[in-house]
């Protein structure tokens, strides 16, 4: 869509038809409760009125999913048939790519170029990948005693509750919904109250693609009410959540207080990005570090928010990142030239500004940014921000900020770098820049992180799993390993 201008995107935004009804049992459902306003962080204007789901709406969605699993055709379809429906979903997402990208950009502030080129590409590829995988899975028949036959079959786990955040509303929904559907499960999806509109479109598109009623339900609502109702529901067999570590703890309690449902968590991060003096290209390392922290407005759990750089090259690398921050184009998310859009809303912007103020109070040095910008637009925009002289004990170094704020720490030897990198409660991702193959292997093994990128950052595809260690969660999204979350292994022993 490189030929679509800023003016054309803005025109399309005004004519966009955004429905805020739940999608339950294959149809839109206005629910019986109140509605709330979804406000665009682009300009502070109301995008749509959205049905605010409560216990009754969650109960209806779970009941539909339970009927569809227990009595409907979906779990019993040949896997190749399920795969064809997922492929049709991918095709329809592609057909409506511009509409979906525009919805994402408006509801959470993502630049339209990223929404169209990255977010939608990920969602489309995810449904297509799992659609192609659906009939490639095989059961096992282990060799055992000559007078017995052992079978290990993989069966769908049941009703899946999926709770996803606002920063990648379609990507993260797809990472959970697509493998669950491929496995034969039914799903109740609760998007963030900040970004429900794209998820509701996904639900309607899935029904249009031929998904039977009740197989994918989308319920709006806030976490303490709708999220809790889904987490405590005894007819939900699996709960998959992406969000903060604090909320992840609630879902573990919900499972313990209900039916001991399996809970899979992809939580926060404070990812280290280590740059050694022998990095193959220091300029590329600095540019990638800047891209990693400022991409998606820094609203990423994998964001390399702790830059650990050897003292001998620290100033050179930091100055390059500061220069990039100064030239980065912050602007209207609907402008294809915008490189960094708006933070998701005013309350989140104030939270990030609070972290910046704390960093100043603790003695870190502000090199660039540190304040809001484009206030006249009514939107929630922040200047890209870099601190150096950050110490390990500072909150800048310890707490997830979830914004475009980089903390630079220095080290003098490799052991210190690994120690600093692992000195966090999180373990989602890490980066390492070095030309030494042995160092790459040794440090990657020593880092307590679910993903380690060497001489790159945020690279990969659907063939590799994604998830965290420590308080960054458990289980894996992406790849065939994601199906482990949505299936049960059954052993059948036949005495011959």
Image (cartoon, helix red, strand yellow):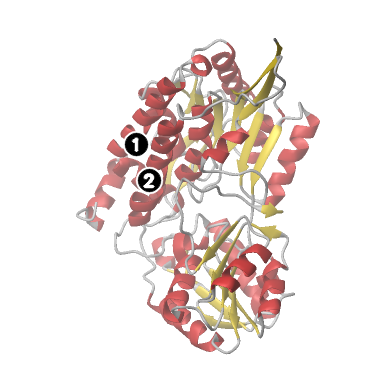
Q: Which residue is mark 2?
A: 120
Circles 1 and 2: CB distance less than 8 Å?
yes
**Nearer-the-camera pick, 420 or 197:** 420
User: How packed is label 1: few (under 14 Cα within 10 Å), some, or many (20 or more)?
Assistant: many
User: Taking 417 as reference, is 314 left or right?
Assistant: left
For marks 1 and 2, the one nearer the N-term is: 1
Placement of 448 over or under 50, stated as above or below: below
- Label 2 environment density (alpha carbons within 10 Å; few <14, some 14–19, many ≥20): many
**x and y, in percent, of residue 8 in the image:** 22, 51
Q: Position of residue 244 (x, y in %)?
A: 65, 51
Give the farthest residue toward the front. Answer: 146
Residue 332: image x %, image y %? 35, 61
- Is the residue 210 above or below the residue 254 in the image? above
Q: Is residue 20 visible?
A: no
Residue 429 position (above or below residue 443): above
Q: Is residue 20 left or right of residue 350?
A: left
- For image coordinates 52% across by 12% down, the residue present is 72
Residue underneath mark 1: 93
The residue furthest left is: 3
Report the residue at 38% width, 52% height from top. 118
Label 2's element?
helix
**Helix, strand, or loop for circle 1?**
helix
Q: In 3D space, how far apart are the residues under numbered discs 1 and 2 (Cα atoms)?
A: 8 Å
In this picture, residue 178 sits left or right of residue 354: left
């Amino acid at each position: 869509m490189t030929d679509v201008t800023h003016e054309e995107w803005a025109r399309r935004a005004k004519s966009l038809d955004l429905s805020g009804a739940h999608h339950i049992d294959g149809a839109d459902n206005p629910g019986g409760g109140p509605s709330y306003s979804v406000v665009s962080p682009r300009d502070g204007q109301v995008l749509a009125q959205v049905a605010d789901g409560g216990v009754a709406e969650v109960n209806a969605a779970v009941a539909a999913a339970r009927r569809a699993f227990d009595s409907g055709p979906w779990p019993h379809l040949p896997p190749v048939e399920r795969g064809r429906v997922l492929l049709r979903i991918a095709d329809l997402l592609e057909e409506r790519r511009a509409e979906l990208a525009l919805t994402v950009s408006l509801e959470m502030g993502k630049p339209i170029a990223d929404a169209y080129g990255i977010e939608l590409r990920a969602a489309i590829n995810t449904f297509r990948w799992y659609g192609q995988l659906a009939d490639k899975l095989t059961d096992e028949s282990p060799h055992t005693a000559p007078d017995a036959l052992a079978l290990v079959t993989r069966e769908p786990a049941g009703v899946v509750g999926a709770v996803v955040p606002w920063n990648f509303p379609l990507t993260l929904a797809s990472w959970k919904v697509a493998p669950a559907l491929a496995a034969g499960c039914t799903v109740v999806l609760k998007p963030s109250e900040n970004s429900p509109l794209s998820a509701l479109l996904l639900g309607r598109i899935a029904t249009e693609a031929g998904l039977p009623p009740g197989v994918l339900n989308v319920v709006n609502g806030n976490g303490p009410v709708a999220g809790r109702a889904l987490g405590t529901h005894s007819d939900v067999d699996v709960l998959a959540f992406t969000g903060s570590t604090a909320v992840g703890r609630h879902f573990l309690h919900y499972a313990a207080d209900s039916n001991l449902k399996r809970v899979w968590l992809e939580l926060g991060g404070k990812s280290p990005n280590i740059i050694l003096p022998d990095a193959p290209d220091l300029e590329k390392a600095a540019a990638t570090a800047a891209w990693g922290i400022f991409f998606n407005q820094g609203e990423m759990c994998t964001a390399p928010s702790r830059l650990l750089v050897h003292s001998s090259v620290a100033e050179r690398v930091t100055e390059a990142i500061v220069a990039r921050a100064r030239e980065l184009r912050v602007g209207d998310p609907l402008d294809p030239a915008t490189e960094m859009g708006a933070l998701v809303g005013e309350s989140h912007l104030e939270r990030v500004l609070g972290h910046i103020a704390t960093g100043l109070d603790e003695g870190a040095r502000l090199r660039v940014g540190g304040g809001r910008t484009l206030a006249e637009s009514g939107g929630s925009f922040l200047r890209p921000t870099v601190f150096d002289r950050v110490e390990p004990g500072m909150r800048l170094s310890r707490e997830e900020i979830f914004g475009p704020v980089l903390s630079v720490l220095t080290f003098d030897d490799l052991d210190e770098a690994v120690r600093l990198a692992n000195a966090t409660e999180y373990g989602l991702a890490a980066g390492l820049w070095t030309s030494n193959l042995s160092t790459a292997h040794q440090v990657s093994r020593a880092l307590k992180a679910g993903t380690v990128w060497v001489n790159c950052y945020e690279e990969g595809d659907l063939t590799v799993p994604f998830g965290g260690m420590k308080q960054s969660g458990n289980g894996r999204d992406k790849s065939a390993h994601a199906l482990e979350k949505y299936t049960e292994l059954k052993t059948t022993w036949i005495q011959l």
